[in-house]
Image: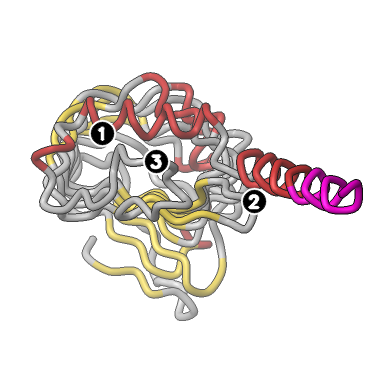
Amino acid sequence: MKLVWSMSVMLVLVFLFDSANRVSALTPEVQVNALKDFYNSTKGPGWYSSSNWMNGDPCENEWYGVSCDSDDNVIKLALARAGVSGSFPSSFWNLTTLQEMYLSNNHLTGTISEDIAKMTNLSFLLLDSNSLSGQLPEAFSDMKNLTIVRLFRNKFTGRLPSSLLHLSTLRELDVSVNGLEKVNFSNLRMKGPGTKLDLSDNDIKATLTPEIYRIEVLDIQDNKLTSELPDPFDDDQNFINY
């Protein structure tokens, strides 16, 4: 009888231990709240697909467009062309483990917060073809994993942040078709094969500097630049549309 009781106790303890482990492995609360706030702020019920959203844990229940790592941290948000409409809630930038953000071709409005600086793991930032506006934040200095940034076809104005131009990790930066007015080309640190910088269709008034020769593909058409590229063109570069 004692043996049976002991075995029962052991089974209960094992169950409790296993349950505790599973609970502790769930997505951190701050990330869950950020996703829920984003859903509510961007008219989640009206998305083209929101399978499993708001039900249980984002990682365990595989919320549509959400990918997680082995530690149940959110590392990818893929909701391009998903009917996402509205602005970013302040809590959204607490998704500090996010590595890839794909929110292109939606109806996002409002601004990008300075708090994006907390997303230091971000590698792909794709927010193109929305209705985001205002000045881009001077907050990219510590985002040293950024590789591809696509912000074209929005309504951004003002200066292209020096902290973004300073990132040597960038392979592609596309801010075309906005209302940007100022760029300090001397801050440009992108360089090498495969790099692309697209500043076309803005209102940029700036002087070109030798740093632009580091870029393999450069598009600066339809601006108000105050100088021209020197002749002859460097044969090792692929300058287009000037």
Q: Residue at x 47, y 63 (%)?
A: 215
Number of labels in the image equals: 3
Label at residue 56: 3
- The local crowd at label 3, few if under 14, some if 14 to 19, many if 20 or more residues have their Cα within 10 Å, is few
**Label 1: element kind:** helix
From the image, give the main secondary structure of the stretch colored magenta.
helix
Q: Secondary structure at mark 2?
A: loop
- Furthest-front residue in this view: 1
Magenta segment: does it hold 106? Answer: no
Residue on which the image places disc 2: 71
Amino acid identity at mark 2: Asp
Q: Which residues are magenta?
A: 1-11
Report the amino acid beneath label 1. Tyr
Q: Is residue 206 above or below residue 98?
A: above
Does 46 appear above or below 241?
Answer: above
Q: Nearer the viewer, mark 2 or mark 3?
A: 3
Vertical arrangement, residue 43 with respect to residue 89, above or below:
below
Q: Nearer the viewer, mark 3 or mark 1?
A: 3
| Badge 1 density bin: few <14, some 14–19, many ≥20, Cα 10 Å | many
Q: Which residue is mark 1?
A: 39
